[in-house]
Image (cartoon, rainbow, N blue to C red):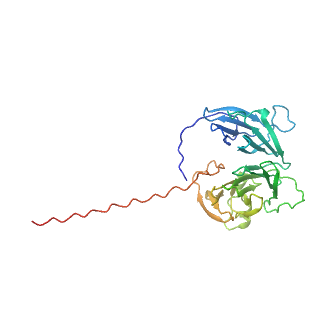
Amino acid sequence: MRNLVLTRHSYARTECAQPSGPLSTNEHVLYAVGKNSVHAVDVGKGQAIAGVLLESPGAEAGEGSERGITGVSYVIDEEAVCVTTRDGEIVLLAEDGAAGSISQDRVESVGQLDTGIAASAWSPEQEVFAVVTFAPSVVLLSKHWLPIADIPLPLDGVEAVSEGEDRPPLSRLFASISWRGDGEYFAVSYTTHAPKDIQRMSYCTPGSEGARASAGACVQVFTRDGELHSTLQPACGRQVPVAWKPDGSSIAVVERSATGYSVGLYERNGLEHGSFALVHHSALQPHAPSSEATPAPTPTPTPAPTPTPTPAPTPT
C-alpha cells in the first residue's frame, strides 16, 4: 500500500460521538456524525459551520431522542447527505448553497422501514442502496427509492425466516456492509453479539466447527440484484467490520484468537485466502481501503559493478 504523508492538520470541536463521515462536493466540508445529529465541519477553517438534530416522529421541537444513526453517506446527484437511523427512517439532508452547510428546514424523510435499520451503504456508482434491517434481512433500493429485493438472513444457527412467516425484529443487531469496487457484489457482516461478547468467545478450540460458527460474525456475499453468492468460512472471534478491496481480489475482516488480532483475507467464493497479524490494535475501527490502494512496487536490485581488470605491466 502507499505510504501516507501528513500535509496539514486542523481541529474542529463538535458534539459528535463519532467524528467521521463523508466529504461533500465542497472539498473543504466534512460531515461529522453524532448519536442523533449531523454536523458540517469546514476542515479548512477548522470549525463546525452547521448542525442538524434528527428528531423522532412525535417528539417535541428541539427534543431529539436517542434514535441512533446507523449509516451516513453523501449522494452526489442529490447534493445531500443520506442518513439512516436505528428506528428505520431514511433521511436526506440537502446542502444549502455552495458553502456546503446544512439546516434543520432542509431535512426530507424519503422512507421508513418498520423493522429498523442496523447498517446501510450505497453502491460505488450510487445506483443501489443496501440496507440491513433488524428482521434480520437485506433490503435493496434503487436510487429512486424503489424496492429491488428483500432477502432474509439466517442468524446464529437459526434458519432465515421464510416468505410469509412472521418473526418479531431483533432487539439488537451489529452489521456492516462493503461493496466491491465495480458495484457487482457486496458483502454483509452481521451478528447479535456485541464486540465485547465476541472477544470473550474468541478463545475457541481450533478445529471446533461448532465453536467457530457461534463465536463470530457471519459474512455473506450478494450480487447487486440480491442473490446470495457465497458465505465466508466461519472463523473464531470474527468482528463485524468488513471491507472489500476495490479490485475485488479479497474481502478483509478482523478476527481475534488467543494470540491477538489478525486480518483475515477471503475470496469472493468464501474461501480463506490468507491473513496477517496486527501488532497495534488498542482501538480497532472499520475503514474502507482506498480506491487508489495498490501494492508497493518491488524494488529492483542494483547490480554490483563489474570490476575492471588491471592490465599487467609490459616488460621493458
Q: Quadrant of residue 36?
A: top right
Q: Quadrant of residue 104?
A: top right
Q: Nearer the viewer, residue 191 or 188?
A: 188
74 with respect to 276 (left or right):
right
Q: Quadrant of residue 162?
A: bottom right
Please provide percent x and percent y for residue 168: 87, 53
Q: What residue is at 69 percent from the left and 58 percent from the top?
A: 238
Q: Is residue 136 visible?
A: no
Q: Nearer the viewer, residue 188 or 64?
A: 188
Q: Is residue 256 visible?
A: yes
How many marks on residues?
0
Q: What residue is at 75 percent from the left and 43 percent from the top?
A: 82
Q: Is residue 149 above or below residue 17?
A: below
Q: Nearer the viewer, residue 74 or 172?
A: 74
Quadrant in the picture for the C terminus: bottom left
Outermost residue to the left: 316
Q: Is residue 131 above or below residue 39?
A: below
Please provide percent x and percent y for residue 56: 83, 39
Please provide percent x and percent y for residue 57: 86, 38
63 with respect to 278 (left or right):
right
Please provide percent x and percent y for residue 58: 87, 36
